[in-house]
């Protein structure tokens, strides 16, 4: 029991020693709030979702999907800090985030129709560029650059989710 307590204490000390932990948890809370508002939007809309136009359905999908991404990736670095050293946390987290971000932005860009507003295409292209920067910094950057890029990409995604919220 004493050993378990010591181990847990060391794990929590490592999690809270990361500089961005508080910011990551705040970003996750904002994403939870945005995702929660999507339920309010669906509830207050008099039409069923099946009757919404394609743009509104896409905005709802973006709002929920990106909020889930942000929540998930905001919690990854604190969880990785338990088994890994600090320099590996941001390397692994940024690689994973960058690969998923690149795949999602590419898939989103390929599946946009011409009827969709240009704003979606521009956001997808910018997202693809942000994902490429994530992968480049994960490959060539130092720990501080990786941490900054990770947090910046989360904030980017929050901005896209907020855009989708406003457009609904």
Image (tube, rainbow, N blue to C red):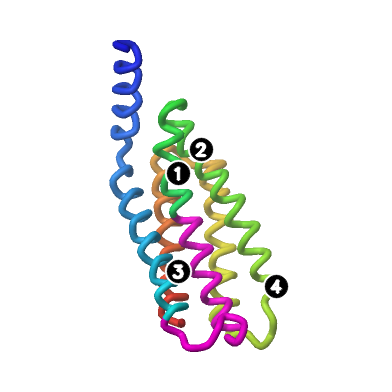
* Residue placed most toward the observer, 22 or 36: 36
143 left or right, relative to 50:
left
Frontmost of labels 3 and 2 is 3
Residue identifier under label 1: 146
Of helix, strand and loop, which one carries label 1? helix
* Residues under numbered marks 3 and 2 in contact, where contact means CB atoms less than 8 Å apart: no
Give the crowd class for mark 4: few <14, some 14-19, many >=20 residues within 10 Å.
few
Of helix, strand and loop, which one carries label 2? helix
Q: Position of residue 71 (x, y in %)?
A: 44, 53
Frontmost of labels 1 and 3 is 3
* Residues under numbered marks 2 and 1 in contact, where contact means CB atoms less than 8 Å apart: yes
Q: Position of residue 102 (x, y in %)?
A: 62, 57
Residue identifier under label 3: 161
CA–CA distance between discs 4 and 2?
30 Å
CA–CA distance between discs 3 and 4?
18 Å
Residue 44 to residue 86: above or below: below
The residue under the point 56% across, 62% down is 129
The range drawn in magenta is 44-70
Give the crowd class for mark 2: few <14, some 14-19, many >=20 residues within 10 Å.
many
Residue identifier under label 4: 111
Residue identifier under label 2: 91
* Residues under numbered marks 1 and 3 in contact, where contact means CB atoms less than 8 Å apart: no
* Residue placed most toward the observer, 86 or 104: 104
Q: Earlier in the sequence, mark 4 or mark 2?
A: 2
């Amino acid at each position: 029991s004493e050993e378990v307590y010591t181990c847990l204490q060391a794990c929590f000390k490592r999690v809270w020693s990361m500089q961005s932990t508080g910011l990551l948890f705040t970003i996750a809370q904002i994403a939870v709030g945005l995702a929660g508002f999507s339920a309010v939007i669906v509830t207050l809309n008099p039409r069923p979702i099946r009757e919404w136009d394609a743009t509104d359905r896409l905005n709802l999908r973006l709002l929920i999907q990106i909020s889930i991404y942000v929540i998930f990736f905001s919690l990854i670095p604190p969880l990785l800090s338990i088994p890994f050293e600090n320099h590996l946390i941001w390397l692994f987290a940024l690689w994973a985030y960058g690969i998923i971000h690149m795949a999602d932005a590419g898939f989103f860009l390929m599946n946009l129709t011409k009827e969709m507003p240009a704003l979606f295409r521009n956001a997808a292209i910018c997202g693809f560029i942000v994902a490429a920067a994530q992968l480049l910094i994960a490959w060539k950057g130092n720990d501080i650059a990786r941490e900054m890029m990770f947090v910046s990409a989360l904030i980017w995604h929050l901005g896209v989710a907020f855009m989708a919220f406003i457009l609904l």
